[in-house]
Image (cartoon, coloured by chain):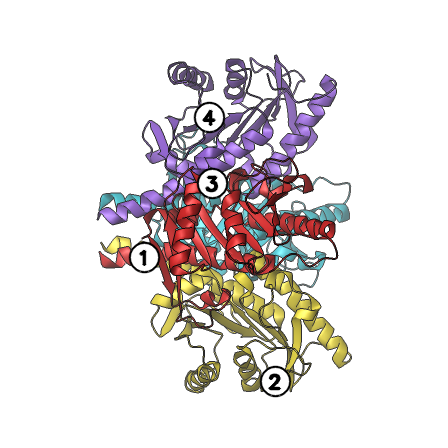
Chain colours: A red, B purple, C cyan, D yellow
Amino acid sequence: MNPVPANNPEEAYQQAVSGLIVAGQRLWQQGWCPATSSNFSRRLDDKSCAITVSGRDKGNLQPTDIMRVDLSGRALDGKKPSAETLLHTQLYLRDPDIGAVLHTHSVKATLVSMDAPDTLELSGLELLKAFAGITSHQSTLRIPVFDNTQDIAALAVEVDSWMKQHGTGHAYLIRGHGLYTWGRDLPETLRHLEALEFLLDWYWHHGLAARLQQD
Amino acid sequence: MNPVPANNPEEAYQQAVSGLIVAGQRLWQQGWCPATSSNFSRRLDDKSCAITVSGRDKGNLQPTDIMRVDLSGRALDGKKPSAETLLHTQLYLRDPDIGAVLHTHSVKATLVSMDAPDTLELSGLELLKAFAGITSHQSTLRIPVFDNTQDIAALAVEVDSWMKQHGTGHAYLIRGHGLYTWGRDLPETLRHLEALEFLLDWYWHHGLAARLQQD
Amino acid sequence: MNPVPANNPEEAYQQAVSGLIVAGQRLWQQGWCPATSSNFSRRLDDKSCAITVSGRDKGNLQPTDIMRVDLSGRALDGKKPSAETLLHTQLYLRDPDIGAVLHTHSVKATLVSMDAPDTLELSGLELLKAFAGITSHQSTLRIPVFDNTQDIAALAVEVDSWMKQHGTGHAYLIRGHGLYTWGRDLPETLRHLEALEFLLDWYWHHGLAARLQQD
Amino acid sequence: MNPVPANNPEEAYQQAVSGLIVAGQRLWQQGWCPATSSNFSRRLDDKSCAITVSGRDKGNLQPTDIMRVDLSGRALDGKKPSAETLLHTQLYLRDPDIGAVLHTHSVKATLVSMDAPDTLELSGLELLKAFAGITSHQSTLRIPVFDNTQDIAALAVEVDSWMKQHGTGHAYLIRGHGLYTWGRDLPETLRHLEALEFLLDWYWHHGLAARLQQD
């Protein structure tokens, strides 16, 4: 299990809050969290995580914009969790090694998600090695692409079903919506996210050029 | 009505000024207010608003670059209002719940505006939920596109006529010029603006790729 | 004539230096001055200007990276002026109202310059009004495009000859090289530059889309 | 030989560390070092260099993220060097005038590298003059493009063989991976890197437009 390393629960929570605030500034500046979209979380222990409150400006998070939820997605401090909290907590329940989850909304992830097949396969790129466990550019990263829905419980079931069949993997896309990625801790998850945004940006431009060459 | 929350008119004005200065820095850094273009306003009460003075650098606004106008667009403090002030005040007059108006000039908004039909319809994107009152990606956001003119009074009449028929909506484009959006207060209006810029950027790239696929 | 407003020549020089340093930070951050390229100047009086020294990092200019030259391009302080100094001084000689000149190297200006006709004509865009003297989007901005050469004296003659025939105008492009623009003072020249970069970015994207539509 | 100018080895190392940290911030902000990718080095003397430790966040390097290696790539301080250290040290061994090496992973370099011929030839652009020894835009810059491999020793042999035949040059690309460039010191190498990123960005967009024109 990968909680925040700390001497006590309050210190763990404060470290999770600081980490999510700094991550938000970094991700917003790259244009991946426009218009208060996106949500970020950090595991606190085997029963709870810290997560961003619904609808806050991710580029300028304040400590009051973070809350505690249990792993069924219920608020532990009276604040209103994001509707998508369940997509975070299902990952913490599925794999005790997952310590952080980031969900973002970039233009390129949105563009790719809308034309992509049900599973996006990426290979031949050195940056694939940014993902934990991948040691060669000749590996293939498989990213499932789910249809968007406002029924988050139903989407969580679909994600769960895919993962039971194919393994947890590193990330998934939701069509016209954004991406989810995760890792052992916040730095690893930020690394996965930056690698995904790079790969999706590459994929988009490469696809345009390939269409022109085929003409 | 959504004025700045404050104890007295002078405090309200100072808060409006601070809010517009910070908004300008944020929007300029994203490239949406080049070359002293764009203008921003904040309702002060039922009879007046604070608005940027004509021709100032929006990325580096000073308190003296903001002024007071009444809702017919007349200066209340001797400064020179932007020619487009009327497009702001007509919104405050139309709907007492409108508390802020932002007008920006991005490259993508300009590109989209020039090829767009008279009403741009956007649907199927999660980020539509950034607009007040939209709760599903399956909703459709309708954005009228007006022809550009230097006769701002005539344009205001055209905007008014459209809104009487179709409702106030969330935003409009002016061809080869830029966009207008509004909201209850400055944070909501910034959220609408970031969502629009995202959607127009997506729309532009999506349109290019679609043309290539049809070949 | 538009020198720096100051009480004495030394104060004027110090103000010119500060202005050029801040302009460099702003322009470098937008990606318009890569790899120590570009040069900037500010008129000091009717006989001299301050200009950036050859080959310095424009995003991090120090006071020692600025020098004085007379209007024939000769160093007044023993430093080495850029090879392109003559393209600045010819503008100060031609028009006493010119108070600043900026030369930058953006990717979009380079792309447009290489495919452009000998005179680029831009019209129908609100941002044209950022240029001094233009009051309607229906005006046409004419930007001559000169072939690149390492013989700067010859290029200066060609520029001069064009301006004698067509007027000084607001800007010119050099193919595969970059753009020159000028104005009464540094803020006006920065406004012209931001407007040009916007217009060239728009022109590039618009041209790509137009080619796709014609297919 | 171009070591860091300093009074003693410890001062030289500290200067190399500071220089690499500042370079990392600058390059990361431009999006060229995503997801802890990339590595940077600075010659210390004729037998060793300072180099970034494997897998650190290049936008936020700490002094402990830099290490010393000898020119056969062996750690001199017990830290773990990047797998690609050999590609740095072979340059210091080949040419005593090389004082710094930068390796980055931008989207545009990756895109260009995957479709490029075995030698990319760039000419006709003023920014070519950013490379040491190039004095005209009419020069041609030749950049070899090597296939990617996880066998860095084999790649180093291939690089060496190319350089024996064609000269050391200024830079090379690795397909689907990134670029290497070098120079006398860190400022010159940063200048080469910014020029390369400009040229590859230009090359990508120019290639797209050229394909559209041929249709």
Residue B122 visible in the picture: yes
Taking the spot 30% from the left edge, 56% from the top edge, the residue there is D210
Give yes or no for contact between labels 4 and 2 (Cβ–Cβ under 8 Å).
no
Amino acid at dot 1: Ala
Location of mark 2 (residue): D74
* Marks 2/1 same chain: no
Residue C41 visible in the picture: no
Q: Quadrant of residue A201?
A: bottom left
Location of mark 3 (residue): C169
User: B194 and B90: which one is in front?
Assistant: B194
User: D138 and C46: which one is in front?
Assistant: D138
Chain to which mark 2 belongs: D
Give yes or no for contact between labels 3 and 2 (Cβ–Cβ under 8 Å).
no
Asked if D99 appears above or below D109 in the picture, the reply is: below
Label 3 and label 2: CA atoms lie apart by 61 Å
Amino acid at dot 4: His
Label 2 and label 1: CA atoms lie apart by 42 Å
Q: Is residue A197 left or right of residue C58?
A: left
Amino acid at dot 3: Gly
Which image quadrant: the N terminus of chain B?
top right
